Image: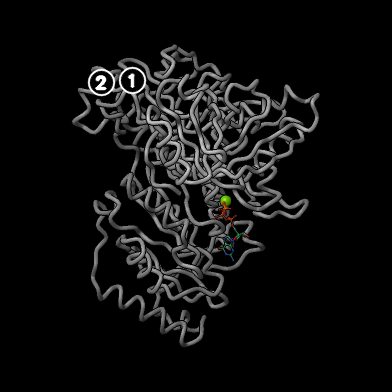
């Protein structure tokens, strides 16, 4: 098969939503119907029950929440699917943000009882900014739900996106009996299987069949028929181009936990969702833009690197250590953007300018991995990372290219962290370095210190807890954290010696970042203003590399 055919078969998407809408549960069921697993696990598995595949981290299983995004690649019906399950909690929003950069489309989950929730709104804004196609799955229909028409209205009014229901639910909660597929005109009735752990049986029937009316009470049936009549009366046709531009979203109803509507969704999704498209390059006026060379110029007007360009390009969007605790490995996640990736190939890392031989490449399936021979645009590849890759690195063969930088979020919470046991100091240092490399925390040190007591900076406080837990579970280091009152970290621009002697308000603190650059920590904007007045030769600059739609 040639590159064009391979690219056409790729579907790379992220599942996003407010916490608890059922992303990990839907992921598990997509794996089940996709034939990638045979028995689905539960998010909060009791002992001896199977736990879900994508929440592989011990703390995730303990808490029943997702903390880090997971990549699952599997074949389905002639397609190669790269499914990215993301955490919903805003404290892990930076990880979700980076993962969205690797996706070509997104599936937005809505809890049918709750509608559009705050975190969903923020994640939607990111998808909108990237103009990626968005699919909507209205989940938990097995529980008492809001009126489906009202939910569609809310998507339109709160998010400002057009909706096109692909199917329509019959009942909700106890009365939820199935969904009517508007494309085929078949009503899919489902039976609840034991804990939804295996595929549910499906029968189809005519929607006006008296046997269908007999399944539910009169009011439920009437609401179902009325809703459908209203939709069909409106006479809208599905506009695929508008979907590809992110202007309308196809909507599916279902219940991930009981498997209702999962197969229908999967089949429609692989057919409707887009394969990888051209990837934008960094703007030429950017500081390293000149490195784009011939390819950037030649393709600039075509919107960047084309997925079927024969030369390999890709970028690192995530780094994760210890997915396999026995091997203490460090893995860099690379999104392939063009060409053919082959094991043992040599590529250039644009940031370091060095050539790297990619000897250990992996196909990713949560914490499991297989060795990989080849990959194409859309695929996410795991590379063993002995410290040569960082988040945002562009890898390429042939003419130089640079993908846009991956912005980091501004930390808002700070704490000093100390290893309780001085004997474990080496492991402590290793753990801290790794968490920094993953972007799980930001690390600062008191200015000019011996770098023994780091200051952690995080976007959300749960990240402190994860750092502490992982240092102990993965590096055997018990730590104590002491909260600091700062809320802002600003880079100090100007002469370094002047910065070192800067006159700061007593509540502020001068620290250095990992690279040794001066950074000032402040409690309030007011203090930043004072510092600026007192030090006219210095500039107090945002620590983040680029403005992002903050989650
Ligand atoms: N009744 C019902 N419960 C569901 C359904 N889907 C998921 N749940 C439950 O909702 C809870 C949260 O599910 P998860 O799949 O972990 O949600 P998530 O969106 O991945 O959550 P985070 O990753 O932490 O943001 C779990 O207890 C699930 O069993 C559903 O269709 N119906
Ligand atoms: Mg989850």
Q: Quadrant of ligand 1?
A: bottom right
State whether residue 374 is above or below residue 145: above
Front position in the image: 456 or 113? 456
Front position in the image: 62 or 538? 538
Q: How is the image coloured?
A: one colour
Q: Secondary structure at mark 1?
A: loop
Q: Is mark 1 within 8 Å of ligand 2?
A: no
Q: Indicate the position of residue 67 as horizontal and vertical percent values.
A: 59, 45
State whether residue 289 is above or below residue 158: above
Give the label on residue 311, or none: 1
Q: Secondary structure at mark 2?
A: helix
Front position in the image: 514 or 259? 514
Tell me which numbered mark, 2 or 1, is placed earlier along the sequence. 2
User: Extreme bottom residue here?
Assistant: 218
Residue shown at 58% from the left, 19% from the top = 386
Q: Indicate the position of residue 126 as horizontal and vertical percent values.
A: 38, 48
Q: Are marks 2 and 1 in contact (CB under 8 Å)?
A: yes
Residue shown at 54% from the left, 26% from the top = 512
Q: Indicate the position of residue 194 as horizontal and vertical percent values.
A: 66, 63
Q: Nearer the viewer, mark 2 or mark 1?
A: 2
Q: Quadrant of the N terminus?
A: top left
State whether residue 69 is above or below residue 352: below
Give residue 286's quadrant in the image. Answer: top left
From where the camera sits, is residue 437 visible? yes
Residue shown at 35% from the left, 28% from the top = 403
Whether residue 38 sits left or right of residue 377 in the image: it is right
State whether residue 82 is above or below residue 24: above
Q: Indicate the position of residue 539 as horizontal and vertical percent values.
A: 39, 31
Residue neighbourhood size for the residue with mark 2, other residues' Cα within 10 Å, grouped as few (<14), some (14–19), many (≥20)? some
The residue that mark 2 highlights is 295
């Amino acid at each position: 098969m040639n590159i064009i055919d391979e690219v056409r078969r790729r579907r790379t998407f992220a599942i996003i939503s407010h916490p608890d809408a059922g992303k990990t549960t839907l992921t598990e069921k997509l794996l089940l119907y996709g034939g990638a697993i045979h028995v689905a696990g539960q998010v909060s598995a009791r002992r001896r029950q199977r736990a879900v595949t994508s929440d592989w981290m011990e703390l995730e299983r303990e808490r029943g929440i997702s903390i880090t995004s997971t990549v699952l690649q599997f074949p389905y019906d002639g397609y190669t699917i790269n499914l990215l399950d993301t955490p919903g909690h805003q404290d892990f929003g930076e990880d979700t943000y980076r993962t969205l950069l690797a996706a070509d489309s997104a599936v937005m989950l809505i809890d049918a009882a709750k509608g559009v929730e705050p975190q969903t709104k923020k994640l939607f804004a990111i998808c909108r900014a990237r103009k990626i196609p968005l699919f909507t799955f209205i989940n938990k229909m097995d529980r008492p739900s809001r009126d489906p028409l009202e939910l569609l209205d809310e998507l339109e009014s709160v998010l400002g996106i057009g909706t096109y229901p692909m199917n329509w639910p019959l009942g909700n909660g106890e009365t939820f009996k199935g969904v009517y597929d508007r494309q085929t005109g078949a009503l899919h009735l489902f039976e609840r299987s034991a804990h939804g752990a295996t595929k549910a049986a499906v029968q189809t029937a005519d929607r006006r069949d008296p046997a269908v009316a007999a399944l539910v009470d009169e009011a439920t049936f009437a609401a179902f028929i009325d809703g459908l009549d209203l939709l069909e009366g409106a006479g809208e046709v599905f506009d695929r181009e508008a979907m590809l531009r992110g202007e309308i979203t196809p909507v599916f109803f279902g219940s991930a936990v009981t498997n209702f509507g999962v197969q229908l969704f999967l089949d429609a999704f692989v057919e409707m969702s887009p394969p990888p498209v051209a990837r934008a390059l960094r703007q030429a006026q950017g500081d390293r833009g000149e490195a784009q060379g011939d390819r950037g110029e030649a393709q600039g007007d075509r919107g960047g690197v084309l997925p079927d360009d024969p030369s390999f390009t890709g970028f690192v969007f995530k780094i994760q250590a210890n997915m396999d605790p026995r091997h203490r490995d460090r893995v860099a996640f690379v999104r392939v953007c063009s060409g053919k990736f082959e094991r043992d190939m040599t590529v250039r890392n644009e940031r370091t300018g060095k050539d790297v031989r990619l000897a250990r490449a992996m196909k990713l399936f949560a914490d499991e991995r297989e060795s990989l021979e080849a990959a194409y645009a859309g695929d996410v590849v795991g590379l063993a990372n002995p410290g040569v890759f960082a988040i945002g690195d562009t890898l390429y063969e042939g003419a130089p290219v640079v993908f846009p930088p991956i912005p980091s979020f501004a930390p808002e919470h700070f704490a000093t962290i100390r290893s309780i046991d001085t004997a474990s100091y080496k492991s402590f240092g290793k753990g801290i370095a790794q968490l920094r490399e993953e972007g799980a925390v930001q690390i600062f040190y008191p200015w000019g210190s011996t770098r023994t007591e780091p200051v952690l900076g995080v976007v959300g406080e749960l990240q402190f807890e994860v750092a502490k837990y992982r240092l102990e579970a993965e590096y055997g280091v018990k730590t104590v954290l002491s909260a600091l009152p700062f809320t802002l970290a600003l880079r100090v621009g100007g002469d370094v010696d002047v910065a070192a002697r800067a006159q700061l308000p007593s509540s502020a603190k001068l620290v250095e970042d990992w690279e040794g650059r001066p950074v000032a920590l402040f409690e309030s904007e007011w203090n930043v203003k004072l510092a600026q007045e007192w030090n006219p030769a210095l500039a107090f600059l945002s620590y983040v590399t680029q403005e992002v739609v903050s989650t």
